[in-house]
Image (cartoon, rainbow, N blue to C red):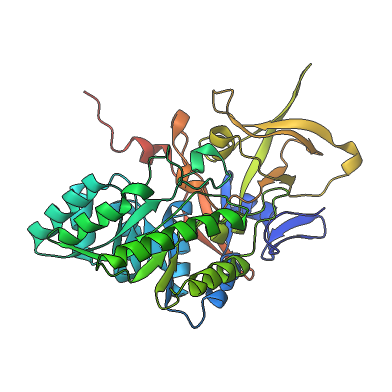
Amino acid sequence: MTLPGSPFLAWQGPDLCLDGVNLRELVRQHGSPLYVYSRQAMLAALAPYQKALQGREHLICYAVKANSNLAVLQTFAQAGCGFDIVSSGELARVLAAGGDAAKVVFSGVGKTRAEMAEALKAGVKCFNVESTAELEVLSQVAHGLGLSARVSLRVNPDVDAGTHPYISTGLKGNKFGVAHDHALATYERAASLPGIEVVGIDCHIGSQITDVGPYLDALDRVLDLVDAIEAKGIRIHHLDLGGGLGITYTDEVPPKADELIAQLLARIDARGHGHRQVMFEPGRSLVGNAGVLLTEVLFLKEGEQKNFCVVDAAMNDLMRPALYEAWMGIVNTQQRAPEQAQVWDVVGPVCESGDWLGRDRALTVEPGDVLAVLSAGAYGMTMASNYNTRGRAAEIMVDGGQTWVIRERETVAQLIANERLI
């Protein structure tokens, strides 16, 4: 059986292993549902970015929202990465994991005054500003603190990334960024404001992108703007080209990171901008295929129209299928006779018809088996909730046969600890 994603996920005899660690054995030790990540798989995904940018002034800012576990952030901090954050909570996580605030870019359309102040005091590298209104407030906050906010404007280039509408961010109808047609005037306003220092330009057009074309189209529009901005006497030090590179969930064939970057750098050089620092904000492409969600089969329920494989993981543990109708690979961690396979909808215990992890999957399965939902390292645990008063899963990191519990399983006592009877 061919498994999508990381080469660190492989069969050893009848058992599915991640970086040499038996996944069924991890469930026996730590319970289910259980997230498991490979540290080596993360570093292997980072390596092409680093290789492609050698010799360039650059910064790779891992997008914290993809997977914000402290051990994951620690892994990327120790590898020299910066971080792309969208909240003060994520900033606190980065600092707790040993990250450098001077390598942090603060994105997001709804930064509060308190978050701005916290980031300014911490000394973040840059704010990716997404509206004129935000720019005015940031100026007030920075000036009031006697500090300077380094900013780039997130420009919306109106480029279709060809992805799911919920994760498309670069079109006119999206909430993100400053409209391309208004960007020059906004830069001029930024340059005139107290407490504001213009340092760069930012563009992020979406997530799970599998084609180079949208990146190149967006880059051309950004470079056109840089020429116009600098003609007004406003210097642009860095080009932040965002993230969004897709991964293989089933049959997608996204460009390799080093090949994508090589094409972008060639376009930058050809247009005379090779002297600028380049920044990227990868998230999913670094962690997506480094993780799996493990879940135990509770019951098999055969029906007239559908067969249901009921497992102990649910939409609160993994929201992507319910939210995006996302397809994620599901395999039994113990190989069984394929000729005995039946077609099942893999569903969880939550009281919603939208609580499913996979539909119409051919599986040979028995109660008590452990299934692995593949490519679950990104937007799994970070989107998890406590719906139905379900504690969030434990998380495990593996590395060359070693294992660490990097988040304990939540208990019901923890869930209700902050609530009070009247």
The front one of 330 and 234 is 234
Residue at 51 percent of width and 45 percent of height: 393
The front one of 361 and 20 is 361
Q: Is residue 289 above or below residue 74?
A: above
Residue at 64 percent of width and 50 percent of height: 28
Picture quadrant where residue 367 is located: top right
Q: Is residue 108 above or below residue 164?
A: below
Q: x, y (%) of residue 31?
A: 58, 47
In the image: residue 62, left or right of residue 199: right
Q: x, y (%) of residue 390?
A: 47, 35
Q: x, y (%) of residue 208?
A: 57, 50
* Residue 26 appears anywhere in the view: yes
Q: Is residue 241 above or below residue 382?
A: below
The front one of 127 and 302 is 127
Q: How many marks do you count on the picture?
A: 0
Picture quadrant where residue 242 is located: bottom left
Q: x, y (%) of residue 181?
A: 35, 48
In the image: residue 240, left or right of residue 345: left
Residue at 63 percent of width and 50 percent of height: 27
Q: Is residue 146 above or below residue 312?
A: below
Residue at 28 percent of width and 32 percent of height: 419
In the image: residue 217, left or right of residue 227: right
Q: Residue furthest bottom?
A: 55
